[in-house]
Image (cartoon, helix red, strand yellow):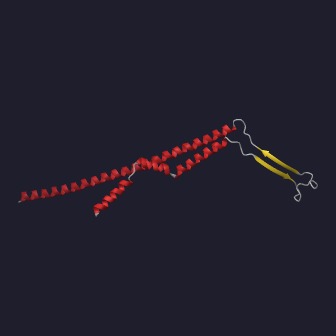
Amino acid sequence: MLRIFSLCFAFTVMVQAQTLETIIENSLASHNSLKSIEQKLSALDDSLELTQNFANPELTFSVSDIQFSDPMSRSVEPMQNEGIAFKQKIPYFGKRGANASYVNAKKSVVYSSLEMAKTALVREIKLTAYTIWEFEKERAILEESLELNRKNIELGTIYTLSESSLHMQTMG
């Protein structure tokens, strides 16, 4: 029964064992900070497309009047004014290009922060893996040292027993 349990345990450990590269790939794919930076990059891509378009036109209707009972009648107030305006902003020469280069500069800054975050994450994963490996090696060395100490104690006990029996033989 114990054998079956230990085989099942060993099998589950082997199934769950992952290589360092697999852990790094999974972490890079599912890290929330990296996802948010990637979303910022996608938003900057969208705003880059918007820099190439003209601004939305505006249509306004205005009435300047003090009286409110009949705003279309000029009999009460001679300073009445009604107006309809249509406005379209046309950028000056090079303004759209300047806006595009500004967005590209922001995008390169965000991209470099993404690369730095990825590098920092990979560094932390590798440092943690190295620390775990280092602790495992220290544990193995300690176990080996304990085994050597046990053997030294056994040898010392055997030597003491053989020396005392040798002393008894010379006495007798």
Q: Residue at x 83, y 51 (%)?
A: 62
On screen, residue 67 above or below 22 = below
Q: Is residue 79 left or right of residue 14?
A: right
The count of marks equals 0
Residue 138 in the image, given as x and y percentages of width and height: 33, 51
Which residue is pictured at 54% across the width and 50% down the height? 35
**Left or right of 103: which side holds 62?**
right
Q: Quadrant of the N terminus?
A: bottom left
Please name whichever residue, 28 or 105, is drawn nearer the observer in this view of the structure.
28
**Between residues 119 and 103, which one lies in front from this camera angle?**
103
Q: Residue at left 66%, top 38%?
A: 98
Indicate the quadrant where residue 166 lies.
bottom left
Taking the view exactly as shown, the residue that stands out farthest to the right is 75
Q: Tell me what residue is drawn at x 20 percent, y 57 percent.
A: 154
Image x and y of residue 147, in percent: 25, 54
How far from the left and from the top, in percent, is residue 46?
62, 45
Residue 67 vertical position relative to residue 104 in the rendered view, above or below = below
Q: Is residue 98 above or below residue 80?
A: above
Residue 152: % across, % down: 21, 54
Quadrant containing the C terminus is bottom left
